Amino acid sequence: MAHSLRSPILRTPDQYGMQYEDIFFSAIDGVPLEGWFIPAKGSKKLIICNHPMPANRYGFPGHLDPWKMFGGFEVNFLPEYKILHDAGYNIIAYDFRNHGRSGQGNGGIVAHGIVEYRDVIGSLRYARSRPDTKDMQIALYSRCVGANSTFVAMDKHPEEFKNITSMFALQPSPPRAFVKTAMDNANIPNGYELFDEAFKKKTGYVLDDFRPIENSKASTIPTLVAQVKDDSSMPFHYVEEIYNNISAKDKKLFWIEGTDQRFQGYNYFGKNPKVMLDWFDKHFK
C-alpha cells in the first residue's frame, strides 16, 4: 500500500500493428513521466489512459514472479488500445510516478491519488501543448488509482476539465475498503487500526486521507463507472457510493459479472468492448 512494486513494460503497440511514439513530459510538480502516443490517422479524438496500481501503461505481468499476488495472470491493455485505435481514437498512455519507467516522486510513496493527481493534470497539459493534439477532443480512461487521481484532479483543478468530453472510471476504490476487507477476512483483532498506525509511520498518511467517495462529487462530466461486482477484495457498495456521489447528470454504472477477481476487470473490455466503445462514441461530437 505504501510503495508500489514497479513492474516491467512487456509489450508495445507495434506488436499489435500500431505505430507509436515514445513520449515524456512532466507532472505539474516536475516529476518526469514517460508514455506512448498512438496516433490514429485523420482523427481529432484523443483518449488519455491512466492505469491502476501496481500496473503501468502496458498492463501488469501478474503471470510472472514476483507479481503473482493478484491471481497469477497477465493484465494486458494493448488489446483495448488496438480496439480504440481501430475505432478512430488517438491514445496517450503513460506511467504514473513510481510506476513503470516514470520518475520517482514523494520519496517513492504511493498516495492513492492525492499526489498522483499532479500526473493527470500534467498529461492534460501535455496533450494541449502538442501541435498535433492541442485541438483534439479529449476523453479519459482512468482505472483504479488512475480514477481516484482523476477525481482529486477534478476537485483541485476543475478548470482543466471544462472541455473533456467524458470519463470512463474503471474500478475506482477507497484504499480503506481493501484494508478493512483484508483485516476482517484474517480475523485480526483491531487489524484496521493497527494497519492504519503502521501505514502512518511509513508514509505520514492515514487511510482516511484517501477519499475517492468524497472526491467523486467533483466529476461533472459524463462518467461511466465499471466494477467487478463480486470483487473478493472489497464489497461493491463502496463503488456504488462513489457512483452515487458523482455530480454529472449523465452517468452510468456497469457491473462486470462472472468473476470475483478484481484484476480480471482490467482485461474485461479488451475482450468485451461494446460498453466502452458505445460510451466514448456517444460523447465525442
Image (cartoon, rainbow, N blue to C red):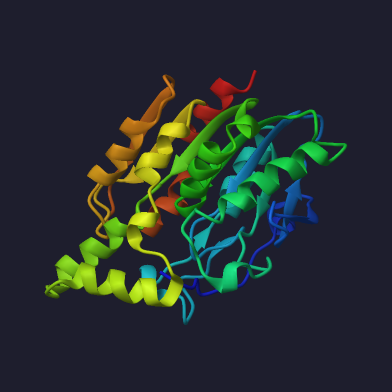
Q: Is residue 258 visible?
A: yes
In the rendered view, tell whether residue 245 sits above or below residue 208.
above
Would residue 7 be visible to someone looking at this image?
no
Q: Kindly give the residue lying farthest to the right in the view shown.
A: 131
Choose top left, top right, bottom left or bottom right for residue 253: top left
How many numbered marks have been drawn onto this rendered protein structure?
Answer: 0
Q: Residue furthest bottom?
A: 65
* Residue 25 horizontal side relative to residue 276, left or right: right
Q: Does residue 219 appear to the left or right of 191 in the view shown? A: right
- The answer to which of 262 and 144 lies nearer the viewer is 144
Q: Position of residue 67 (x, y in %)?
A: 46, 76
Question: Is 255 left or right of 163, judged from the image as shown?
Answer: left
The answer to which of 259 and 115 lies nearer the viewer is 115
Q: Residue at 57% of width from left, 22% of height from top?
A: 283
What residue do we see at 44% from left, 51% from top?
Answer: 144
Where does residue 197 sit, x and y in percent of width and height?
A: 30, 73
Q: Position of residue 208 (x, y in %)?
A: 33, 56
Question: 54 or 66: nearer the eye?
Answer: 54
- Residue 92 vertical position relative to residue 74 in the rendered view, above or below: above
- Dividing the image into 4 quarters, which one contains the C terminus? top right
* Horizontal relation, residue 258 to residue 53: left or right: left
Residue occupying the point 54% across, 21% down: 282
54 w.r.t. 42: above or below: below
Q: Quadrant of the N terminus?
A: bottom left
Measured as percent of width and height from the top left, residue 64 is found at 49, 78
Who's the residue at 55% across and 56% down the image? 115
